[in-house]
Amino acid sequence: MNGESALANGNPPTPPHSYSRTNLSRSPPADRVQKLTPLEGEVLVADDFPFEGYGSAYDRVCALLESLDASLSGRELSESLDFSKPMSIRMPLRDFIKLDENIPYEHGYPQYEYDPRVSTLVVRCKPSPIRETFISEFITAFAMVEVSLPLDFPWRISIIGKPFFMFRGKYSGITKNPAIAVTFLDGDGIARPRFVLEVGITETYEQMTGDAQKWLEGYPGTSVVVLVKLEETPEYRNPIHGLSEEELEEFGLPSREEIKATDFTMDGLGQVVFKELTWVGSISGFLEVWRRHPNTGLAVRCGARMDVLADPPLHFKLSEFVPIAPQDERTAKIDWERCRGNLQSSMRALAASRCREAISSNETGGEVYVS
């Protein structure tokens, strides 16, 4: 693939623990607060955040993080929450800065995006095993390039997904986490992202193309953005929610502790089934490569949309990102066969997790969601 064409399976990261309103108390520096105007015609994000009775937006976010910690630890929640989907809330910039400065990001989750033009925070609480499968494959591809380079290679490469990046221009002030960013240490000693991957399941295609525009038009040096849009069909709904004990007995579900991923059956990447109930839908998706137009500077899609499960011809030459000597040329390639195998394992693991949580939900009389 030329420059004009489209450019280990580990466990998903565990979100950090111990979110306490008492630990998030430092006041933000005043000089970071600025007033910004929304773009013309931009749609405001709806406030769909839980914990309405907790007062300020800051306290509500802290309550969410405490509930996430309880969920991960197996403790009972004060209210039913869907951690699988992004949650948005209107929040003053000053509160977001305080949140940003006090929450650890060493595990990569939760992830945040903040738009000061509309004073809106979006929180992604938990990684989806399906989403993480694709992220892992891209990390592996670039990591193999990194370890093959000579020790005196002049560009230091880092593969990251944790820090915030703040955009410029018409996106000035917006901050977000990438799924992953491949950064190169420039001559001025600053590591700037040249390649960015965004993977979405619950996000709309319009939201994802908006991310591509932010990276390419609002962050200098970004050369390539890859969008992977995934879809689960049908969308998950707890199949035993609201069933009586007699109805549950008809399905013969074992106890929560006896559920094993190997008990679930699937056909290729189709639906994952256990006891004649569907726990994960079929996974499909597409991939697009976006670049900055050399004349207009605007983000544009390069080449055709590709089926992400059909071995898309995708690889990236190191020279696409930084000037290098011919002998240092390397190519990052995605192993799609390995990705499909890992995806099957992730789908079974997700199905088992959903089944366990559904059984717990019926025992406690609530509804639990697992992404």
Image (tube, helix red, strand yellow):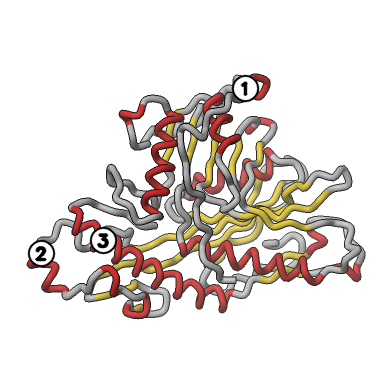
Task: Please indicate whether residue 17 sits to the left or right of residue 30 in the image.
Answer: left
Q: 52 or 3, which is in the foreground? A: 52
Q: Amino acid at mark 1?
A: Val
Residue 124 % position (x, y):
47, 47
Choose the circle earlier in sequence order: 2 or 1.
Answer: 1
Please name which of the two marks, 2 or 1, marks the residue nearer to the observer.
2
Locate the C terminus and report the quarter of the image it occupies. bottom left
Identify which residue is drawn at 32% across, 30% down: 52
Q: Amino acid at mark 3?
A: Ala
Real-space Cα separation, disc 1 to disc 3, in angstroms: 44 Å
Location of residue 88 (image quadrant) = top left
Asked if residue 353 shows in the view, the reply is yes
**Mark 2 vs 1: CB contact within 8 A:** no
**What residue did someone put label 2 on?**
245
**Residue 72 bears which disc, if any?**
none
Location of residue 262 (image quadrant) = bottom left
**What residue did someone put label 3 on?**
358
**Residue 33 bears which disc, if any?**
1
Q: Secondary structure at mark 1?
A: loop
Residue 94 % position (x, y):
56, 24
Give the class, few, some or many, for how many residues have Cα within 10 Å of label 3's Cα (few <14, many ≥20): many
Q: Secondary structure at mark 3?
A: helix
Q: 102 or 225, which is in the foreground? A: 102
Asked if residue 38 shows in the view, the reply is no
Residue 91 % position (x, y):
47, 28
Q: 188 or 297, which is in the foreground? A: 188
Choose the circle earlier in sequence order: 2 or 3.
Answer: 2
Identify which residue is drawn at 64% across, 23% down: 29
Choose the circle earlier in sequence order: 1 or 3.
Answer: 1
Identify which residue is drawn at 50% across, 61% down: 131
Real-space Cα separation, disc 2 to disc 1, in angstroms: 55 Å
